[in-house]
Amino acid sequence: MRYLCVLPLLALTLPAAAAPPSRDIELTPIAGYRGGGSFDDNVSGDSLDLDEAGSYGLILNIDHDANTQWEFMLSRQSTSLDPGPTAVPDFDLDVTHFSAGGIYVWRDEKVEPFIGAGFGVTHMSPDDSAYDDETRLMFQLNGGYKIWLTRNIGLRLELRGYTTFMDSDAAIFCAGGACVARVESSGFGQLEGNLGLSARF
């Protein structure tokens, strides 16, 4: 009979033992500075460079296992082509990177180094709505540190390198059959430094 009394206690412990480990979620608004990116106009011979400028965005991390996390990132920069094409001397645009990937984290209570990578798209949107937007595939690498001030609040310091793939000979930013430039490029790279405030749930 005494064994029958133990059975209900064992049944109560089974759901807890079978339950999967909790998965933390981290949400990090970021502010940064991004530079790099140029196009060679194969008609005029000019080099069209994206100006360095500030950027801002959001990073979402979801635990996958003890040392890895899924990562989703959105980062936006308002910039312009410099020098501007002759027909459009002040060509302002927003360059937005979105990627999905993952990071490896060296776990610690206070300071956690990490490295990661992801694939996504680069969306280039001219301020003048008369011109077409451009969307291209993108690959990014990142690394940095998470510095936890408390169990759930921390600072994130990171560097990101973006490679945006282009057609080898493509017309970009067209309006009414006329395009800002026809570029000879397989892609362009940008480097971004970010600082963020992370909240862990």
Image (tube, rainbow, N blue to C red):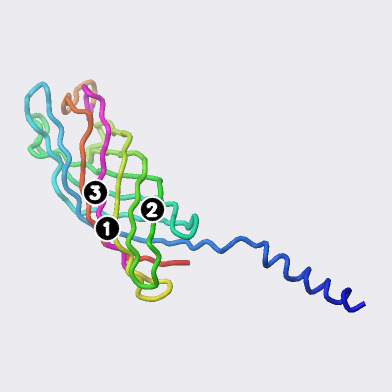
On the image, the x and y values in percent for residue 49 come to 12, 38
On the image, the x and y values in percent for residue 170 come to 23, 23
Which mark sits nearer the N-terminus, 2 or 1? 2
- Mark 3 is on which residue type? Gln
Judged by depth in the image, the label closer to the viewer, 3 or 2, is 2
- Mark 2 is on which residue type? Ile
- Kind of element beneath mark 1: strand
Using a 10 Å C-alpha cutoff, classify the residue at mark 1 as few (fewer than 14 neighbours), some (14 to 19) or many (20 or more). Answer: some
Q: Residue at x 24, y 53 (%)?
A: 55
Which mark sits nearer the N-terminus, 3 or 2? 3
Q: Do the residues under discs 3 and 2 have CB atoms within 8 angstroms?
A: no
Say which residue label 3 marks: 77
Depicted 6 relative to depicted 18: above or below: below
Q: CA distance from mark 1 to mark 3?
A: 17 Å
Q: Residue 18's quadrant in the figure?
A: bottom right
Q: Do the residues under discs 1 and 3 have CB atoms within 8 angstroms?
A: no
- Kind of element beneath mark 3: strand
User: Which circle marks residue 158 in the picture?
Assistant: 1
> In the image, 134: left or right of 108?
left
- Mark 1 is on which residue type? Glu
> In the image, 147: left or right of 190?
right
Relative depth, front residue between 192 and 11: 11
On the image, the x and y values in percent for residue 142 come to 29, 51
Depicted 68 relative to depicted 134: above or below: below
Whether the magenta-drawn stretch holds residue 129 is answered as no
Q: Quadrant of the N terminus?
A: bottom right
| Span highlighted in magenta in the image | 155-174
User: Which circle marks residue 103 in the picture?
Assistant: 2
Q: CA distance from mark 3 to mark 2?
A: 23 Å
Depicted 47 relative to depicted 76: above or below: above
Q: Residue at x 41, y 56 (%)?
A: 60
